[in-house]
Amino acid sequence: MAIRRRNWTAPDGAPKTAWVVDYTDQAGKRRNKQFKRKKEAEAWELKARSEVVSGVHTPDSASIDVTSAARLWLATVRDADREPTTVGSYDQHIRLHILPKCGNVRLSQLTAPMVKGYLNGWLRDLSRPMAVRVLRTFKAILTNARDEGFVAQNVAQGVKPANAPRGKRKVKPPSKADLKVILKAVKDTDDRKAAAIVSLTIFTGMRASELRGLAWDSLDLNGGTVEIEQRADAKGTVGPPKSEAGYRTIPLSALVVKALKEWRLECPPNGKNLVFPSESGRVLSHTVLMKDLVGPLQVAVGITSSDPNKPRYTMHAFRHAAASLWIEQKLNAKKIQTLMGHSSITVTFDTYGHLFEDAESDAEVANAIERALFDDAA
């Protein structure tokens, strides 16, 4: 590589000076890049020399900008038949958060410090979970561009957010007192569908999407287990879990088995053999699930928010309840991760680490939880 000074006269007669780096890339092709200042040329030459030796240099002329790379990646996501809601989320990350910061930047010009700067901006402007998701999308865009040959390396790969301050993301599950009241209502209500939904969620920690897509074939009421092997998206399309971690088997307590058996006697037949179909036999929407089933059961026994006509707890709150009850029964973090369907143990600790700090067979644990809730009421 060599740096040379270039002098010329502009059309208006003014003298001009620039510094040009002449070099040969790792493919043996001669290249050059021009700078206004010698210091800039020297800094770039040093960086390019290292990249050529490592085989990761990409000339600007052979690269594309972030906007083009994002479009290419989003097209591959759509071609992979990802759920519309997932594609929509990625598109939002790109349009609202990535392109405004660096849409015109060529991939070859990106550096790890630049990506770290973008991340700091996202952490400042967005919630931490959203900022992390945007970074994950950005990394996926660069990985795809690297695989397609538009850049030789993914400079964002090693960029990570600093650890969140302890206690910042503490989850507060429903109180045991409220759970006892709700589960007593489950026993007393004539709405067997609502009773089965609420008890199943509290004792299994199933996601609402998994519950909406649950089929009778996935239940073993004699053995007392439910196998999670499909879910329903926001548009009511039934498909596999989002990740391998979503596939799991969860024990059922006697109360849940009883509620499901009672509901099975009333459950109308439907084409997908769903446990909780809508009135028309289709996938139950999340809105109807809360408005017509889970919400009224809570309101009827006074478990409400500041508005006496609105329920206190969401389906996700009941998912947290299940995790907290398992932790109270001394299940270890790895087991909680499996039962909750978390993709990593980090997610489990980030969400419930404080509950582990506060705090055998699967069937025994499930029924022990039920006894713990009802002993005081007996």
Image (tube, rainbow, N blue to C red):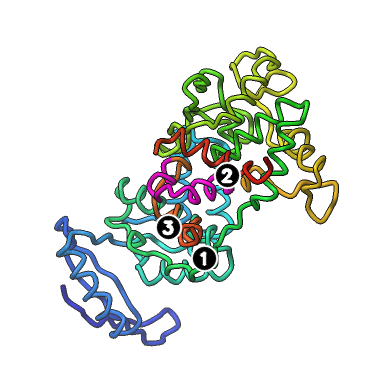
- Where is mark 1, residue-wise? 101
Report the disc number at residue 244.
none
Compared to residue 41, the image places residue 329 above or below, namely above
Residue type, numbered disc 2? Ala
Residue 235 in the image: above or below residue 301: above
- In the displayed structure, 145 sits above or below 263; it is below
Secondary structure beneath label 3: loop
Can residue 103 be seen by looking at this rendering? no
Residue under circle 3? 65
Residue 133: % across, % down: 49, 55
Q: Nearer the viewer, residue 367 or 59?
A: 367
Identified by mark 1, the residue type is Lys
Query: In front: 310, or 357?
Result: 357
Left or right placement of residue 346 versus residue 100 in this view: left
**Residue 290 x/y as whole percent:** 73, 38
Badge 2 crowding class, 10 Å Cα cut-off, few under 14, some 14 to 19, many 20 or more, is: some
Dot 2 lies on which element?
helix
Amino acid type, label 3: Asp
Residue at 57% across / 58% down in the picture? 171
**What residue did someone put label 2 on?**
372
Q: Residue furthest front?
A: 378
Mark 3 or 2, closer to the camera: 2
Q: Distance from label 2 to label 1 (Cα)?
A: 53 Å
Q: Nearer the viewer, residue 329 or 241?
A: 329
Residue 325 inside the magenta-drawn segment:
yes
Residue range in magenta is 319-338
